[in-house]
Image: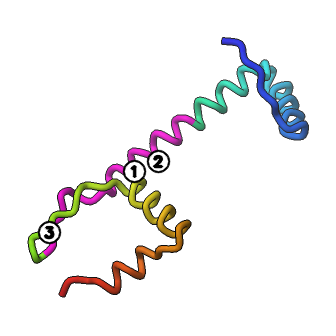
Amino acid sequence: MKTTLEIPDELYRQAKVLAARENRKIEDLVTEGLRLFLERGKKTQSHHLRRMTKAPVTIRRGNVIPAVSNDEMAKLLECSTSVGVDLRSEARRTRIP
């Protein structure tokens, strides 16, 4: 597939030098770099899934907390902070004995 990308001049120069040094086409270098980047993302994603808490979580009083992934929890914390609510402080304040 053909596409057009805007790449910073210095980054392009570095890629061009590396491609020439390795006797490769720059498009092959970019394709390989993109593949490596996407593979790294898959590994990171599977690492987060392994660290996810088993759900549902039951608190002593019988309340059930729905399953939430680490990424979803991070987004909730980020959103709450942006509207002026600190969920971390709130959670510490309202812990169930």
Percent position of residue 35, x then y:
59, 29
Furthest residue in direction top, as rendered: 1
Label 3: how many Cα within 10 Å (few below 14, some 14–19, many 20+)? few
Residue under label 3:
63
Q: Which of marks 1 and 3 is nearer the N terminus?
A: 1
* Amino acid at dot 3: Asn
In this figure, what is the number of numbered marks? 3
**What number is the disc on residue 44?**
2
Gap in Å between the C-alphas at discs 3 and 2? Answer: 32 Å
Percent position of residue 89, x then y:
42, 82
Magenta stretch bounds:
38-59
Residue located 85% across and 25% down the image: 20
Q: Earlier in the sequence, mark 3 or mark 2?
A: 2
Q: Do the residues labelled 1 and 2 touch (CB within 8 Å)?
A: yes
Q: Do the residues labelled 3 and 2 touch (CB within 8 Å)?
A: no
Residue under label 1:
47
Tell whether 36 sits left or right of 28: left
Q: Which of 29 and 87 is in front in this view?
A: 87
Nearest-to-viewer mark from 1 and 3 = 3
* Amino acid at dot 2: Thr
Residue located 46% across and 76% down the image: 86
Q: How is the image coloured?
A: rainbow
